[in-house]
């Protein structure tokens, strides 16, 4: 992939109130990578280009690489799904029976979880009220197959552009920092500038959800 010139990096965004843990804890688990950009260290793309990560991990690799000659990538994905299902079952037993199934890929269904959180509040955030399912959540996180950092970044960048195109003009771009992707969203989460409960925002979220790769929520 051709390397693009990067623009000055904004300070990393903080999470929006009440849902930071849910979005960042289960969003992506990527290994630390050395970033190769025109300004070094961290990179963020403007709308005119896409930042690049050198030597990004292949999506075909899994954390079960030691057993790949016998079981192949499916083993890692199956273990991840099973662990996520145990987390979901815990949330159903301790928080709400309506907590949704994971997708077949093993990733949580954020569209349904976001809707449930709108109805129930922060009880369903992160590992549930009081960290009721923390152990199950951490187990699932540890089994998530490695992701392609570059593709995750490009997906969230396309999502941010889509959100702005659908009327959420202040929705910020994601950032690449220290080999990880920091989602975009509200430019000032501690004093929100975007009304996330507005009909216009919810319509934009619905219109742009297909821009995100499986397992990404796209917002802090």
Image: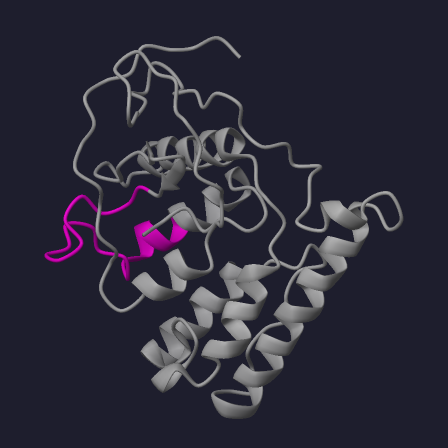
- Quarter where residue 103 is shown: bottom right
**As drawn, which residue projects farthest toward the right?**
70
Magenta span includes 130: no
In this picture, is 131 found above or below 35? below
**As drawn, which residue projects farthest toward the left?**
191
For this rendering, which residue is in front, 128 or 117? 128
**Mainly helix, strand or loop, the magenta region?**
loop
Q: For this view, does 20 lie left or right of residue 57?
A: left
At which x and y percent is residue 120? 38, 81
Residue at image position (21%, 39%) is 170
For this rendering, which residue is in front, 109 or 193? 109
For this rendering, which residue is in front, 122 or 40? 40
- Quarter where residue 92 is shown: bottom right
At which x and y percent is residue 16? 24, 58
Residue at image position (22%, 64%) is 17
Magenta span includes 194: yes
What's drawn in magenta, residue-wise?
A: 184-203
In this picture, is 57 found above or below 89? above
- Quarter where residue 168 is shown: top left
């Amino acid at each position: 992939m051709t390397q693009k010139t990067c623009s000055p990096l904004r300070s990393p965004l903080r999470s929006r109130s009440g849902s930071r843990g849910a979005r960042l804890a289960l969003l992506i688990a990527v290994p630390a990578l050395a970033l190769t950009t025109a300004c070094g260290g961290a990179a963020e793309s403007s709308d005119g280009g896409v930042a690049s990560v050198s030597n990004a991990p292949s999506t075909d690799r899994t954390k079960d690489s030691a057993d790949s000659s016998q079981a192949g990538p499916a083993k890692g994905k199956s273990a991840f799904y099973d662990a996520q299902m145990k987390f979901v079952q815990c949330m159903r037993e301790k928080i709400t029976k309506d907590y949704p199934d994971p997708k077949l890929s093993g990733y949580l269904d954020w569209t349904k979880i976001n809707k449930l959180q709108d109805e129930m509040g922060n009880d369903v955030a992160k590992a549930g009220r009081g960290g009721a399912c923390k152990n199950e959540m951490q187990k699932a996180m540890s089994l998530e197959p490695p992701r392609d950092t570059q593709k995750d970044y490009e997906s969230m960048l396309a999502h941010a552009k889509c959100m702005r195109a659908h009327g959420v003009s202040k929705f910020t771009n994601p950032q690449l920092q220290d080999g990880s992707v920091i989602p975009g969203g509200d430019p000032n989460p501690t004093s929100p500038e975007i009304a996330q409960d507005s009909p216009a925002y919810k319509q934009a979220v619905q219109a742009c959800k297909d821009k995100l790769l499986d397992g990404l929520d796209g917002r802090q």
